[in-house]
Image (tube, rainbow, N blue to C red):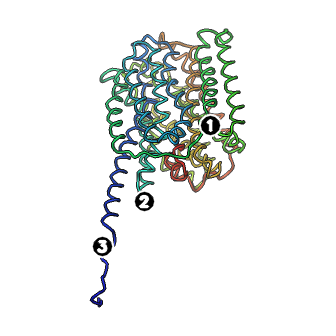
Amino acid sequence: MNTKPHEIVPSDAAAVSPLDIDGRSRRASTGRWAVVITGLALFMATLDNLVVTTALPVIKHSLHAGLAGLEWTVNAYTLTFAVLILTGAALGDRFGRRRLFLAGLVIFTTASAAAAVSPSIGWLVTARAVQGAGGALIMPLSLTLLSAAVPTERRNQALGLWGAIGGLAVAAGPLVGGAVTSGWSWQYIFWLNVPVGVVLIVLARWRLVESLGPRQSLDVPGVAFATTGLLGIVLGLVRADAHGWTSLGVSASFVVGVVGLGAFIWWELRTPKPMLPMRLFRTRSFSVINVAALLMSFGMFGSIFFLSQFLQVVQHYSPFAAGLRVLPWTGMPMVVAPVAAVLAERFGGRPVLAAGLALQAVGLAWLALVTTPTTPYGALWMPFVLSGVGMALFFVPLASVVLASVRPEQEGVASGTNSAFRELGGVLGIATLGAVFSANGSYTSAAAYQSGLLPAIWLGVAVIAAGVVVTLLLPRGIGAGAARQARSPATVARRDPEPELAV
């Protein structure tokens, strides 16, 4: 190449300033640390949704708990998680995302230690409720912090990994809980969170960068009304069998619940900064998909609650063996998700969602038909697999249908609302199926357990089947073309300018 003596021909190495290289290197390092910190925090918080399910029979014996105590052991976590998840991101915007993320880790870790030393079921339930509050800060803010820390060109990959970690935690929950309970004791389910939480607190202070978002006013009355209403309903369901459906205490709980939820709706329609914008429900597709999600979680989590105990209480499997046998159900979405995404992208969300609900209902009905105290596992694994396939077909296109139901600027709060509806479905499912179980059976013998289990499972089947009908009200083709991106909650973050609500 011919050049004049005074000309400088830039090389590839000289095209980038050393300062730029150093800045990119620091950003890449920060991003890698953010993936590790937020991923571990997400795994810890999500795992605790289902990690206690296979330990429930042992907890029952250890703490002399009744059915109501076991229900609250699960529901206390999911209830506070669901109610506060829409508030977690707003708190981070207002007071600092890293600061509130750290607060969530401290709360979660401290509550885990308190749960591990529980002398009574009441203590454990209280600790679980506090854990749920910590998780409601950890989950949305982990997504926000990760999105901000990772370089743009690697953000989709990092957020996809974030979503996969959450899915893995859900699948591993019963298995991990069973393994820990069998190998050590049920207390170590919670003790294991403590060193992990302490390390994460140190790393988060050291490696995460503080940021603020748009200052949002906090909807404190909305949170109070929602909490009061939901607690009243759930408390009434849990206490109904022991005290009678028409007893003063149970009737008062239902009245308080209905009044609280009515006050919540009234307030949300009038406040300028609502926790849950009611205008979103004017869109038929948004209302339909949230009702369908609630019905699916209602039947699914309520059934998992009792079937995982059936394997131990009636068939005398160890907690680990029971968790391993439930894995074809809870772990199947990890296998089927790519196929479900392709189907939803091609045919739209409505038929895939309806098929998922239908397969879940058929799988549960199959289990109800074949389950007896002496049924071999060979007769159970196929309906478990069928239920797992149904779970995948429903949850994979769910995010794309939710986002397609609202305007782009509403996507964050819409996805957060859907997450809350799913959590609340699980709470109500466990409470309602628990009431049916108590009215028809007990833990006193294998026959008594089966007498309560079967009508509870059939109720779960009926509720999920109703979800099939509800789903058919969705517009044709909704969610088509975007379902591939809906494999994980991270998709919402990529599309939403304020991803902290996209959980």
Name the residue that disc number 1 marks: 275
Q: CA distance from mark 1 to mark 3?
A: 52 Å
The mark that comes first in sequence, 1 or 3, is 3
Q: Secondary structure at mark 1?
A: loop
Relative to residue 284, is residue 156 drawn left or right?
left
10 Å crowding of disc 3: few (<14), some (14-19), many (20+): few
Corner quadrant of residue 432 = top right
Rendered image: mark on residue 303: none
* Residue 327 percent coordinates (x, y): 42, 34
Give the residue at x 48% y 9%: 444
Which residue is more in the foreground, 32 or 237? 32
Which is nearer the eye, 135 or 434? 135
Residue at 52% of width from left, 28% of height from top? Answer: 78
User: Label 3, label 2: how many angstroms apart (C-alpha)?
Assistant: 22 Å
Residue designated by label 3: 14
Whichever of callouts 3 and 2 sits on the residue coming sooner in the sequence is 3
Placement of 171 over or under 72, stated as above or below: below
Q: Amino acid at mark 1?
A: Met
Amino acid type at circle 2 is: Glu
Identify the residue position indicated by label 2 in the image: 153
